[in-house]
Image (cartoon, grey):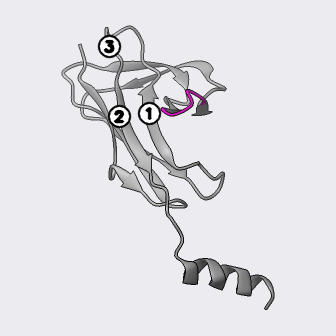
């Protein structure tokens, strides 16, 4: 049985930052993913799948020692502040492999908010 992990480059992000996701198979055997994309992202707050809902049945094999990185640009399609879980689309290995990350809510200061309003009229 393979030992596969999923991790992000940090646990907390500001809105608009890029989330880097790494999937790694440390072995000793290969691991099969049953769908593409290899993972889905679910809002822990709402239960909504925000990425990977359109999975395509496709087997992708990671040999021992293989890693791949993916990115999620939270500014391209803005993700709401909150908790998110990344779940791997694995075959029957007996457990859910996942990790969590957070997009924090930024409270604008009065000067920041006023500066944004002034910028609209320049």
Residue in the image at 23% along x and 23% along y: 3
Query: Does residue 46 belong to the magenta stretch?
Result: yes
| 74 inside magenta stretch | no
> Residue sitting at 42 percent across and 12 percent down?
91
State the residue at coordinates (21%, 30%): 26
Question: What is the spatial separation of the Cα atoms under label 3 and label 1, in whole angstroms?
Answer: 14 Å
Instruction: Give the numbered dot on residue 86.
Output: 1
Q: Is residue 110 left or right of residue 25?
A: right
View extreme (left): residue: 28
Q: Position of residue 5 (x, y in %)?
A: 29, 31
Could you tell me residue 69's position as x and y percent? 41, 46
Q: Which residues are magenta?
A: 44-48
Chief SS of the magenta region: loop
Q: Which residue occupies the foreground of this view, 117 or 94?
A: 117
- Residue occupied by mark 2: 99
Q: Is residue 51 in sight in this rendering?
A: no
In the rendered image, residue 56, in percent from the top left (x then y), is placed at 63, 21
Mark 2: few, some, or many residues within 10 Å (few <14, many ≥20)?
Answer: some
Q: Which mark is residue 30?
A: none
Task: Quadrant for residue 122, please give it.
Answer: bottom right
| Marks 2 and 1 in Cβ contact (< 8 Å) | yes
Disc 2/disc 3 C-alpha distance (Å): 13 Å
Distance between the alpha carbons at the discs numbered 2 and 1: 5 Å
Query: Which residue is labeled 3 in the image?
Result: 95
Decide: is 74 above or below 52.
below
Mark 3, Cα crowd under 10 Å, few <14 / some 14-19 / many 20+, is few
Mark 1 nearby-residue class (10 Å; few <14, some 14–19, many ≥20): many
Sequence-first tag of 2 and 1: 1
Q: Give the structural element (helix, strand or loop) at label 3.
A: loop
For the residue labelled by badge 1, is the local secondary structure a helix, a strand or a loop?
strand
Name the side, left or right, on which 88 lies relative to 73.
left
User: Can you see residue 60?
Assistant: yes
């Amino acid at each position: 049985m393979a030992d596969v992990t999923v991790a992000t480059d940090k646990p907390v992000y500001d809105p608009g930052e890029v989330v880097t996701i790494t999937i790694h198979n440390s072995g000793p055997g290969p691991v099969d993913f049953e769908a593409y994309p290899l993972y889905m992202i679910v809002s822990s707050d709402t239960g909504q799948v925000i990425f990977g809902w359109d999975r395509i049945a496709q087997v992708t094999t990671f040999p021992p020692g293989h890693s791949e990185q993916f990115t999620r640009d939270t500014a391209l399609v803005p993700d709401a502040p909150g908790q998110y879980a990344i779940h791997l689309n694995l075959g029957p290995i007996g457990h859910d492999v996942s990790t969590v990350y957070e997009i924090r809510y930024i409270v604008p200061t009065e000067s920041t908010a006023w500066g944004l309003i002034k910028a609209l009229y320049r």
